[in-house]
């Protein structure tokens, strides 16, 4: 499997530049050539249509910009390192996501749904506010937007048919 990764050794660690494998489930190794895998590089998995599940070890500290973007069949991604740094749009366009897990957190399904609906990268960061407070704030803002601003299609679940009867 290591032959499916294109990587460089930077500062005594592995920097994954690209992935050419066809596995549906991928367990990124903790080390390659005896060096810890620490960085998933910019666009490393971009647009991979084969990936369904990705498991990253605790050694991975950073996922750079667009690392997994547009992996349209990606359903689950687990970061064993709960303090992993996710840069810009790491999961953009991964609309099939059902689970996003950090370390031992139990909000993986909620996080995937919230990210899918709100498409807000802030939900993938752990900063000053607690995650649930941030989710509440983002959801409240989303719900306060006037339906006339183009969101009515997200809210109508057939009730528009009632006016025609």
Image (cartoon, grey):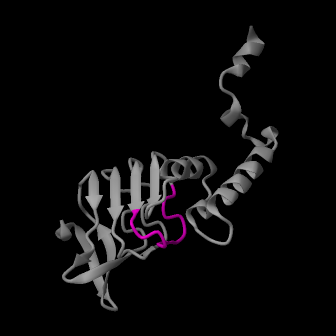
Q: Residue 99 location, x and y as percent?
A: 45, 50
* The N terminus: image quadrant: bottom left
Of residue 154 and residue 55, the one placed in the foreground of this image is: 55
Q: Nearer the viewer, residue 104 or 128?
A: 104
Image-quadrant location for residue 44: bottom left
- Residue 78 in view here: yes
The residue located at (70%, 16%) in the rendering is 161
91 in magenta: yes
Is residue 40 shown left or right of residue 12?
right
- The location of residue 100, given as percent across then percent down, is 46, 55
Instruction: Look at the image and give the residue range highlighted in magenta.
Output: 79-92
Q: Does the magenta portion include 151?
A: no
Q: Is residue 15 above or below residue 135?
A: below
Residue at position x 76%, y 52% from top?
Answer: 141
Q: Residue furthest top?
A: 165
Picture residue at 43% right of the left edge, 64% below the top: 103
> Looking at the image, can residue 69 be seen?
no
Q: Is residue 109 above or below residue 132?
A: above
Q: Is residue 137 left or right of residue 146?
A: left
The rendered magenta stretch, by its main secondary structure, is classed as loop
Front one among 37 and 43: 37
Task: Locate residue 11, reporting x and y percent.
Answer: 34, 92
Q: Which image quadrant: the C terminus?
A: top right
């Amino acid at each position: 499997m290591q032959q499916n990764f294109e990587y460089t050794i930077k500062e005594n660690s592995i920097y994954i530049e690209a992935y050419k494998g066809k596995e549906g489930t991928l367990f990124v190794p903790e080390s390659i050539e005896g060096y810890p895998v620490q960085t998933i590089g910019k666009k490393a998995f971009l647009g991979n249509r084969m990936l369904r599940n990705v498991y990253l070890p605790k050694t991975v500290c950073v996922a750079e910009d667009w690392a997994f973007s547009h992996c349209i069949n990606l359903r689950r991604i687990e970061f064993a390192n709960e303090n992993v740094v996710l840069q810009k749009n790491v999961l953009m366009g991964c609309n099939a996501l059902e689970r996003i897990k950090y370390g031992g957190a139990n909000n993986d399904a909620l996080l995937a749904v919230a990210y899918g609906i709100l498409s807000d990268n802030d939900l993938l960061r752990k900063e000053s506010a607690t995650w649930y407070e941030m989710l509440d704030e983002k959801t409240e803002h989303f719900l306060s937007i006037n339906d006339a601003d183009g969101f009515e299609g997200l809210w109508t679940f057939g009730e528009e048919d009632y006016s025609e009867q």
